[in-house]
Image (cartoon, helix red, strand yellow):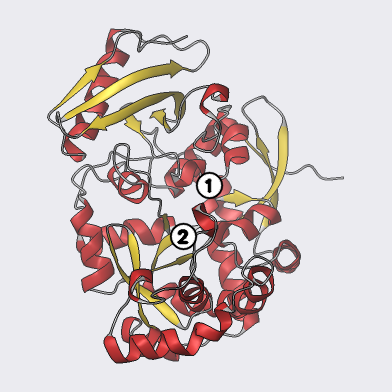
């Protein structure tokens, strides 16, 4: 039985970092078409509200372009309409040309969410659909505070939605509304035809075309993957649909089976483009240190990151404080092609200081003078990006 080609762990890490925009120095233009190209290559940028330093989507882009600032993304999203906001595995900012391939997701969510949300919203949110749509058509873009006056809310947290807010979210998730902008991170919705360009709306791919697009573009951005990883990338096709796609592509010779070497030396079977093995001479990523968002694309699939980099990472936002191993919102630290540790830091905006509470190096890593200088440089860049004047290291910040 013929053996499969083997991709070394170092080559696999470099391929993966290259596909995720971290194999080159974070220099170059950071706005307009250049920024759009960065997002297009990533596929999407996850949106998150936590702002201990800066929000996740901004930190993701800053890690790839030092000159990036949040206003650059707003211009593409709200003025140029080169991007739209919707759902992948979570809320995300996505290139506008990909919008037609979300129709399959809209159709599937229209049925699935209605059935699921009926189990916890027994207050007639479906009855608010026409009212919400008519309100926006008559008065313009609206947020949850603009509809549902006097309606009862839930019991708190994510469940703390009044029926009209639930209707807004459903109409967005099913494609009838779009997020036109955010105000203080609150979504403002408008009719889809007012946000999405007419030519984009006119493109209506079939389900089969969407599945092929989703699987193909996911593999291109992952470099190599299992069918499950392909399905999870955009979170719009089922694992079985991805498995069937892989089988058809293997039969045509469009993809091949490869064994990837994990950080612990074990092998894992994946699929890849036939030319993947020709890309293993990628240049070594720059040795600089970068502070990554907990939601950086490199870490989105925690299990994949652990296999490739030997780096175990879980966000502890929802872990009770006494049970946290590290901290509420701890940032991964990348040096070259290695994840070397995690850092707990937070902006004191009143004082203009980025406070570093703790740095935990990975086992065997020495924080010598040269590495400390690189870490200081990375923190200085992050502080400037967040609008802070300086970095302060608190007592006991060096941890084992």
Residue 278: mark in rendering: 1
Q: CA distance from mark 1 to mark 2?
A: 35 Å
Q: Residue at x 40, y 28 (%)?
A: 333
Q: Quadrant of residue 140?
A: bottom left
Q: Residue at x 14, y 28 (%)?
A: 351
136 relative to 294 in the view: left or right:
left
- Mark 2 lies on residue: 91
Question: Closer to the camera, 236 or 394?
Answer: 394
Q: Residue furthest right?
A: 1
Q: Residue at x 42, y 80 (%)?
A: 177
Q: Quadrant of residue 344?
A: top left
Q: Of helix, strand and loop, which one carries label 1? A: helix
399 relative to 231 in the view: left or right:
left
Asked whether the viewer can see residue 37, the reply is yes
Q: Report x, y in % for residue 37.
A: 32, 61
Q: Of helix, strand and loop, which one carries label 2? A: strand
Mark 1 or 2, nearer chain start: 2
Q: Report x, y in % for residue 187.
A: 36, 66
Question: Closer to the camera, 223 or 105?
Answer: 105
Q: Is residue 137 above or below residue 39?
A: below
Q: Report x, y in % for residue 80.
A: 23, 73
Which part of the image, by quadrant, shows the N terminus?
top right
Q: Is residue 240 above or below residue 174?
A: above
């Amino acid at each position: 039985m013929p053996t499969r080609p083997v991709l070394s762990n170092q080559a696999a890490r470099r391929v993966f970092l290259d596909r995720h925009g971290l194999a080159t120095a974070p220099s170059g233009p950071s706005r307009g078409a250049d920024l759009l190209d960065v997002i297009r290559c990533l596929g999407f940028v996850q949106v998150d509200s936590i702002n201990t330093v800066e929000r996740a989507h901004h930190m993701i882009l800053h890690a790839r372009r030092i000159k990036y600032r949040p206003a650059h993304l707003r211009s593409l999203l709200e003025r140029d309409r080169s991007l739209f906001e919707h759902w992948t595995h979570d809320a995300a900012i996505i290139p506008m040309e990909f919008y037609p391939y979300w129709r399959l997701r809209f159709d599937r969510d229209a049925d699935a969410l209605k059935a699921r949300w009926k189990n916890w919203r027994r207050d007639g949110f479906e009855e608010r659909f026409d009212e919400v749509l008519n309100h926006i058509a008559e008065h313009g873009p609206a947020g949850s505070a603009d509809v549902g006056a006097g309606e009862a809310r839930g019991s708190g947290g994510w469940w703390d939605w009044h029926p009209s807010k639930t209707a807004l979210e459903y109409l967005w998730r099913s494609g009838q509304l779009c997020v036109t902008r955010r105000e203080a991170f609150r979504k403002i919705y408008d009719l889809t035809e007012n946000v999405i360009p007419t030519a984009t709306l006119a493109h209506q791919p079939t389900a089969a075309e969407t599945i092929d697009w989703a699987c193909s573009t996911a593999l291109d951005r992952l470099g190599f993957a299992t069918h499950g990883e392909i399905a999870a990338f955009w979170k719009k096709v089922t694992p079985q649909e991805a498995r069937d796609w892989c089988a058809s592509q293997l039969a045509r010779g469009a993809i091949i089976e490869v064994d990837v070497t994990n950080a612990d030396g074990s092998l894992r079977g994946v699929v890849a483009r036939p030319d993947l093995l020709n890309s293993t001479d990628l240049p070594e990523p720059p040795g600089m240190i970068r502070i990554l968002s907990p939601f950086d694309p490199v870490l989105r699939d925690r299990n994949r990151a652990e296999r490739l980099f030997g780096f175990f990472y879980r966000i502890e936002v929802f872990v009770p404080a006494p049970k946290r191993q590290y901290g509420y919102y701890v940032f991964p630290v990348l040096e070259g092609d290695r994840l070397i540790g995690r850092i707990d830091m937070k902006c004191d905006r009143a004082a203009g200081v980025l406070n570093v509470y703790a740095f935990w190096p990975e086992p065997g890593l020495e924080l010598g003078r040269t590495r400390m200088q690189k870490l200081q440089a990375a923190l200085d860049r992050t502080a400037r990006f967040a609008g802070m004047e300086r970095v302060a290291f608190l007592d006991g910040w060096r941890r084992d």
